[in-house]
């Protein structure tokens, strides 16, 4: 690890602790303080040394338990006190993880930062359930989008560009907005029978999977009462699910 006080930004992967990088796990095991989010699994937190400080800053009920500016300040305070501060985030810190905002604040304050990437939910979970994101003849590309927006605010996505049946569409944070996503994609030209899957708690022991057409997925997910975090994947690659 570095000689000077450092913040180590670590991607924890989608949940299964064995899907973390060796580098990220080593940094966690050598940490003096760990700041972590809701999506970091208990099995990974079990690797934090007994004497290290643990600070939870995750979201609860759709709001940050700490505003982003306060998290940035917390990291600055901690790195003034401890030499090895690990900032642990679910998946990859740079995929819908606000990792770059934290790095920018730290670098602006002259703090040394090192980053270990993580397996993002899309790649980790799809591989785990036996599905590719691209596949010759089924999907010639893949797009990751977020459906995160204000509670009563309609989603501001470019529906006509997303409604491409030959590209796999992965929606992060889409559970609450699934009926709107399905409706708007179909209105923009995506076939109603486009194969789709929703995965709850992917790669974890209580993972649940719900497959169906784009038109029927919102009802199926509701009936199955899928719990967050949920990843939604829409595309012909889902026909390979067995
Ligand atoms: C704030 S984003 C963080 C994404 C993370 N940085 C990544 O690279 O996977 C949280 C969203 O990621 C997805 N997600 C992350 N882990 C998941 C899991 N184990 N199972 C299902 N979805 C997951 C869900 O869509 C969730 O709402």
Image (cartoon, rainbow, N blue to C red):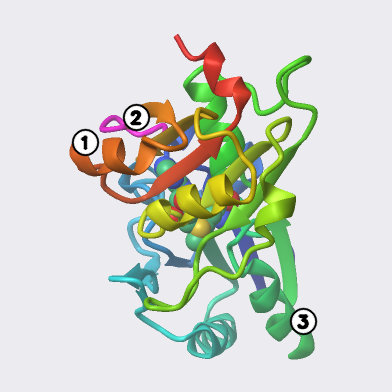
Whether tag 2 and tag 3 are in contact, CB under 8 A, the answer is no
Judging by the rendered image, the residue that carries numbered circle 3 is 107
Q: Where are the magenta residues, as a range?
A: 202-207
Q: Nearer the viewer, residue 220 or 32?
A: 220
On the image, the x and y values in percent for residue 147 come to 52, 61
User: Could you classify mark 3 by the number of other residues whose Cα lies within 10 Å: few (under 14), some (14-19), or many (20 or more)?
Assistant: few
On the image, the x and y values in percent for residue 102 come to 64, 77
Give how far apart the Cα atoms at labels 2 and 3 are. 42 Å
Judging by the rendered image, the residue that carries numbered circle 1 is 224
Quarter of the image holding residue 69?
A: bottom right
Quadrant location of the C terminus?
top left
Compare marks 2 and 1 and give the one earlier in the sequence: 2
Which residue occupies the extreme top position in the image? Answer: 242
Q: Nearer the viewer, mark 2 or mark 3?
A: 2
Please indicate whether residue 164 sits to the left or right of residue 97 in the image.
right
Give how far apart the Cα atoms at labels 1 and 3 are. 45 Å
- Principal SS element in the magenta part? loop
Quarter of the image holding residue 208?
A: top left
User: Could you classify mark 2 by the number of other residues whose Cα lies within 10 Å: few (under 14), some (14-19), or many (20 or more)?
Assistant: some
Compare marks 1 and 3 and give the one earlier in the sequence: 3
Identify the residue at image location x=80%, y=28%.
140
Identify the residue at image location x=71%, y=39%.
164
């Amino acid at each position: 690890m570095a000689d000077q006080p450092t913040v180590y930004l670590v991607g924890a992967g989608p949940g299964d602790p064995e899907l973390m990088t060796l580098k990220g796990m080593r940094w966690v095991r050598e940490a003096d303080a760990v700041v972590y989010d809701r999506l970091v699994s208990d099995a990974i937190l079990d690797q934090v040394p007994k004497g290290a400080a643990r600070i939870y800053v995750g979201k609860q009920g759709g709001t940050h338990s700490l505003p982003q500016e306060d998290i940035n300040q917390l990291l600055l305070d901690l790195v003034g006190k401890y030499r090895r501060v690990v900032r642990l985030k679910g998946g990859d810190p740079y995929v819908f993880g606000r990792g770059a905002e934290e790095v920018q604040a730290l670098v602006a304050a002259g703090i040394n930062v090192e980053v270990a990437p993580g397996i993002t939910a899309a790649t980790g979970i799809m591989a785990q359930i036996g599905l590719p994101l691209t596949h010759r003849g089924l999907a010639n590309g893949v797009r990751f989008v977020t459906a995160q927006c204000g509670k009563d605010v309609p989603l501001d996505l470019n529906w006509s560009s997303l409604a491409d049946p030959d590209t796999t569409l992965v929606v992060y944070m889409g559970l609450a907005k699934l009926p709107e996503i399905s409706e708007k994609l179909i209105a923009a030209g995506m076939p109603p029978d486009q194969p789709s899957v929703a995965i709850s708690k992917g790669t974890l022991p209580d993972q649940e999977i719900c497959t169906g057409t784009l038109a029927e997925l919102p009802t199926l997910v509701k009936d199955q009462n899928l719990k967050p975090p949920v990843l939604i994947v829409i595309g012909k690659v889902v026909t390979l699910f067995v």
